[in-house]
Amino acid sequence: MPPAANPSLSKTNVQKITPKQPIRVRRPSREEALQAVRTLIRWAGDDPDREGLLGTPDRVVRSYEEFFSGYDDDPVALLQRTFEEMDGYDEIVVLKDIRFESHCEHHIAAIIGKVHIAYLPNNRVVGISKLARVVEAYARRLQVQEKMNAQIANCIQHVLEPKGVAVVIEAAHQCMTTRGVHKPGVTMVTSTMLGAFREDSRTRREFLAMIRNPESVGG
């Protein structure tokens, strides 16, 4: 159970950060993108005009459209529709094991993992699918895990204005598993705690217990 109301956890003491929108740049034409892929194929040492590679530029460009579709999404707008009919519910809301696929901005290598989200409602809640969509909106961009962690938490805090938000991300980074130091099996864990989850250790421990031990839910 979360602790009783504490003046130190009031909304005025919760970190106020307005989510930043991605920098808008002029996108090259599709043909320019196709030519860029052909150039990389030649730089790698192969012939983009040989039979097996003729369709590769188009497939790569279409893959990029999917990988980085988050630049076209507005995470704030995804959370705008909320519900106030809670019948007095004031416990932690947790959505765990949200799988995501992203790409690191340093090597454009895959980041694959899962996100755990919790918030302590303050008179309104949001549909759980919207939380998963916020994760997708930020994941489908060139990313750094620490930045993505903070972006998700700050967006939820900014829009829902709950008593607190907690976000934990666990992910494997192919920039270190398939290149460089070549260390497979390594998981990076990051967290952002705002409001009640930062200020009250009991609330934080309850969240961490819930994402580590399914039997703790309702216990």
Image (spheres, helix red, strand yellow):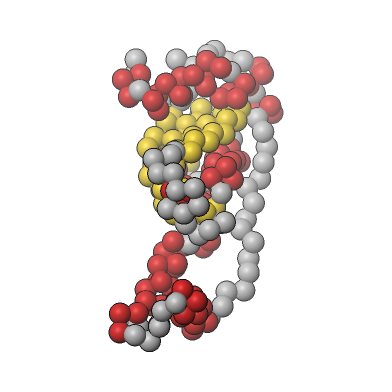
Left or right relative to 181: residue 54: left
Number of dots carrying numbers = 0
Front residue (pair 77, 29): 29
Q: Where residue 176 sits: x, y (%)?
A: 48, 48
Front residue (pair 133, 149): 149
Q: Is residue 201 above or below residue 117?
A: above
In which quadrant will I find the N terminus? top left
Q: Where residue 112 sits: x, y (%)?
A: 41, 48
Front residue (pair 85, 75): 75
Q: Where residue 192 sits: x, y (%)?
A: 57, 34
Q: Is residue 62 above or below residue 151?
A: below
The residue sitting at 50% across, 80% down in the picture is 39
Front residue (pair 43, 75): 43
In which quadrant will I find the C terminus? top left
Can residue 10 be seen here? yes
Left or right relative to 56: residue 33: right
The residue sitting at 54% across, 13% down in the picture is 4
Residue 208: image quadrant is: top left
The residue sitting at 52% across, 22% down in the picture is 204
The residue sitting at 49% across, 19% down in the picture is 205
